[in-house]
Amino acid sequence: MNIKSLQFFLHLCNSKNFSQTAQKMHISPSALSRLIQRLEQEVSQPLFIRDNRSVELTTAGRKLLPVANRIIAEWQQLQQELTEPDQMLKGKLTLFCSVTASYSHLPHVLNQFRQHYPQVEIQLVTGDPAQAVDKVLHDEADFAITALPDNISSKLTFIHLGDVSISVISPLVAPSGLQTLLTPEIQWNKLPFILPEHGKARENADKWMKSNKIKPNIYAQVAGHEAIVSMVALGCGIGIAPDIVIENSPMRDQIQKLPTAAVEPLTLGLCCKQSRQQEPLYQALLALFK
């Protein structure tokens, strides 16, 4: 039994497909089959039940699985500890994102990055997401989590992370003056609006208002999105904000989403300069996001 055999075994446990594992692990299906057979001979038990369409673990295979996971994990830890310090990645990476993105999208990736590259310093800067692209272009940040602009610079690489819906929100319990504008029918042109100051979310909000022939009475324009939810919860007006911000806000139980035609969602992603994406530090972080 060797490390390589256990790595093939673990991959096959996940894929449950000999052809898929063979392709991913760069080995022929026949060679993979022989390797698994040798492993079965070493444990004196069949590890998989095979037929033409599926592969399932036997009782012996299920018992070997946690043992194999532990051995591989300990081997990888040992390899890392024995790596010469001078050969390990070192340096500093600056990431820019909104406060919400710092705990909705980053923790899992940064935890993995810290384990793999303990000598790389991560500087996390939070702020208005509308500034994210400029921060990267002007070398104030190495990476940024941002909404995809309509015309992204050809100097940037953008990795799609997901789409973020946008909602129109009002206080759950609105002050009497605001309530009269919300019921029985919503008087859009008289309502005080709290909007992002600029950025893709503001552009999408403007498109929505134009398509609904709303000439907004703007009460406040906010840099960043988190404060919009707070101001709406306090009864200052109605707001337009990304759902991921609303759902992660400590004030989320004090607001409600208004039943309206949908605002165009944001395409969220990670961006960096194309000219630097081949640098080792950049490749290491990009690999985790991809």
Image: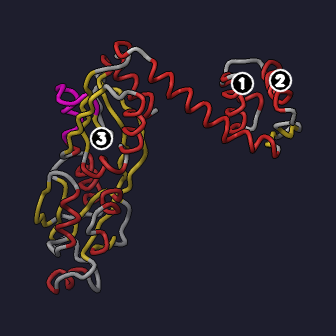
Q: Which residue is mark 3?
A: 146
Identify the disc placed on residue 250.
Answer: none
Residue type, numbered disc 3: Thr
Seen in the picture, residue 64 relative to 280 is either above or below; the reply is: below
Depth check, front residue: 227 or 64: 64
Report the residue that reaches farthest toward the left: 219
Q: Is 175 placed left or right of 17 in the picture?
A: left
x then y, percent, for residue 193:
17, 66
Identify the disc placed on residue 38.
Answer: 2
Depth check, front residue: 239 or 186: 239
Depth check, front residue: 240 or 216: 240
Mark 2 neighbour density, 10 Å: few (under 14) some (14–19) many (20 or more): some
Give the CA distance from mark 2 to mark 3: 50 Å
Find out whether residue 201 is within the magenta segment.
Answer: no
Q: Nearer the viewer, mark 2 or mark 3?
A: 2
Q: Earlier in the sequence, mark 2 or mark 3?
A: 2
- Residue span colored magenta: 131-143
Residue type, numbered disc 2: Arg
**Which quarter of the figure is the N terminus placed in?**
top right
Q: Secondary structure at mark 3?
A: strand
Give the CA distance from mark 1 to mark 3: 42 Å
Q: Which residue is mark 1?
A: 5
Residue at 41% from the left image edge and 33% from the top image edge: 115
Depth check, front residue: 201 or 281: 281
Seen in the picture, residue 24 relative to 63 is either above or below; the reply is: above
Seen in the picture, residue 16 relative to 3 is either above or below; the reply is: below
Q: How many marks?
A: 3
Residue at 27% from the left image edge and 59% from the top image edge: 241
Residue type, numbered disc 1: Ser
Give the CA distance from mark 2 to mark 1: 9 Å
Mark 1 neighbour density, 10 Å: few (under 14) some (14–19) many (20 or more): some
